[in-house]
Image: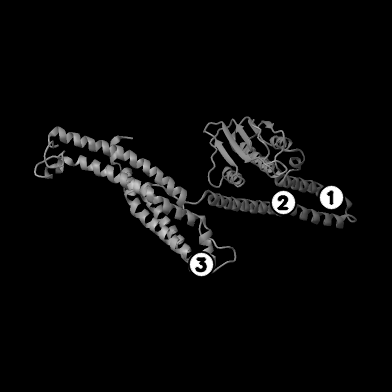
């Protein structure tokens, strides 16, 4: 970063202006917080204390909204709004609203910001005022030094006599001091702005707990949508596949029954065709059951289940599973279906000649890695299978990492939380 850009850049001006505006905004917030809470606290013995306190907290939340807007405009940091006010389920009216304001931690964090912001605002206001006042005053000194006292220059003894700065070298010295002050001031402004960003993000944004709750709610909606889509798929497969085939089979057997006495040969042929239909219906039901939860996974675990999946892949697959114990059934099922879907992608899109599956446990996580030597270029574009897979993993606090340059190879790593089959997270056993 050039010194000129650091000193005169738009960012420095915006952040310096933010530092100057800190003091009036902090004075308003501090006065409102201290006087409002003191007054409402003293009136808690009356019926107006709690409503007054809730009103003060609501005003401080509004002031926090203004501060987030100021930070967005001048500091370039977009702090999301905190969790909204929520009354208890089934509760309405003034008391429910007051309770929602008092229980909401964002209200109290906005109050804490208003109180602690004033001392810091004094620091930033003083720092920006001094460095800009001294810096720009010194830089512009050659333009106004002649207006001092009865003769040009700066009097050293303060009484109009003595050494004055009015010569060319004196003016150059003063301007140099001003430039150095502005450069140092720009660095100082950047440093104070970093503290301002951290303070606004920590106290005026959503808390980590609220953000986690929001994320869990989003993940839950993804799981619900995915489950609903799976149920619709199963219903469609049953209706269009096995059910339709069984209905046709029942009709064929009815016709064969009618012809049994009149035309035994035709009836035998129809029964033979019905027997073939029964085999197809059974195969469809087995495939459907395997898509829901394969019996081999429940009975024998990931190794045999994935070996069965690997045999249906169009390329040879090497499997290396390093697990001394089995994870919880839910985690085991997610690992199985994740691997199965990745192998299907390899069969359909990769043009690979070989693939490998590695599964191991590290700390409290189950790691799964699928690699192929195909053409690469796999990306989780919106609506794609990889994007859906990443969403499903995120819903259980997992993640999906994709490394697939064009030309290959492709390495996709899935990480899942480890839980033992008794529901605990188990011990730590690094690989």
Question: Which quadrant would residue 172 be assigned to in this image?
Answer: top left
- Of callouts 2 and 1, the N-terminal one: 2
* Position of the N terminus by quadrant: top left
Asked whether residue 13 is in view, the answer is: no
**Residue drawn where x is 74% and y is 36% of the image:** 304
Q: Position of residue 247 (x, y in %)?
A: 77, 56
Label 3 sits on residue:
45
Can you tell which quarter of the image residue 184 is in?
top left
Where residue 357 appears, x then y in whole percent?
A: 65, 33
The Cα–Cα distance between marks 3 and 1, rounded to whole angstroms, is 89 Å
- Return the residue at label 1: 271
Relative side of 263 to 150, left or right: right
What is the number of callouts on the image? 3
Q: Which numbered mark, 2 or 3, is in the foreground of this view?
A: 3
Q: Position of residue 261 (x, y in %)?
A: 90, 56
The residues tagged by marks 2 and 3 sit, at their Cα atoms, a distance apart of 72 Å
Q: Is residue 112 left or right of residue 398?
A: left
Find disc 2 in the rendering and name its residue: 241
Helix, strand, or loop for circle 2?
A: helix
C-alpha distance separating marks 2 and 1: 20 Å
Look at discs 3 and 1 and give the one toward the viewer: 3
Q: Residues within 10 Å of mark 2 (few under 14, many from 20)?
A: some
Q: Is residue 211 above or below residue 101?
A: above
State yes or no: discs 2 and 3 in contact (Cβ < 8 Å): no
């Amino acid at each position: 970063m050039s010194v000129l850009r650091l000193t005169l850049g738009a960012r420095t001006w915006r952040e310096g202006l933010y530092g100057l505006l800190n003091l009036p905004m902090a004075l308003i917030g501090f006065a409102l917080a201290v006087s409002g809470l003191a007054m409402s606290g003293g009136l808690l013995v009356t019926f107006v204390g709690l409503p007054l306190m809730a009103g003060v907290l609501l005003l401080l939340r509004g002031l926090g909204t203004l501060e987030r807007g100021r930070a967005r405009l001048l500091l370039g940091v977009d702090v999301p709004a905190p969790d909204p006010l929520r009354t208890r389920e089934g509760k309405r009216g003034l008391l429910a609203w007051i309770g929602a304001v008092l229980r909401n931690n964002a209200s109290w964090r906005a109050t804490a910001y208003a109180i602690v912001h004033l001392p810091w605002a004094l620091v930033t206001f003083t720092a920006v005022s001094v460095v800009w006042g001294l810096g720009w005053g010194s830089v512009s000194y050659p333009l106004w030094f002649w207006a001092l006292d009865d003769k040009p220059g700066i009097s050293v003894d303060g009484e109009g006599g003595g050494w004055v700065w009015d010569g060319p070298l004196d003016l150059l010295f003063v301007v140099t001091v001003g430039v150095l002050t502005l450069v140092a001031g720009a660095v100082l402004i950047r440093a104070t702005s970093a503290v301002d960003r951290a303070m606004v993000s920590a106290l005026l944004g959503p808390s980590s707990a609220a953000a986690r709750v929001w994320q869990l709610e989003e993940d839950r909606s993804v799981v619900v949508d995915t489950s609903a889509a799976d149920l619709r798929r199963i219903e469609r497969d049953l209706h269009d596949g096995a059910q339709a085939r069984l209905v046709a089979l029942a009709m064929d057997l009815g016709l064969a029954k009618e012809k049994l006495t009149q035309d035994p040969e035709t009836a035998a042929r129809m029964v033979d065709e019905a027997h073939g239909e029964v085999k197809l219906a059974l195969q469809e039901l087995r495939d459907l059951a395997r898509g829901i939860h394969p019996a081999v996974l429940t009975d024998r675990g990931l190794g045999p289940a994935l070996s069965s999946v690997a045999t249906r892949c169009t390329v040879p697959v090497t499997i290396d599973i390093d697990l001394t114990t089995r994870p919880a059934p839910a985690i085991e099922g997610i690992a199985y279906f994740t691997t199965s879907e990745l192998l299907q992608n390899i069969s359909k899109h990769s043009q690979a000649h070989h693939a490998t599956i590695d599964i191991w446990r590290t700390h409290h996580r189950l790691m799964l890695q699928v690699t192929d030597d195909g053409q690469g270029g796999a990306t989780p574009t919106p609506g794609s299978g990889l994007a859906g897979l990443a969403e499903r993993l995120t819903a259980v606090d997992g993640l999906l990492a994709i490394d697939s340059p064009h030309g290959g190879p492709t390495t996709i790593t899935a990480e899942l939380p480890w839980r033992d089959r008794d529901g605990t997270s188990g011990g730590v056993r690094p690989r």
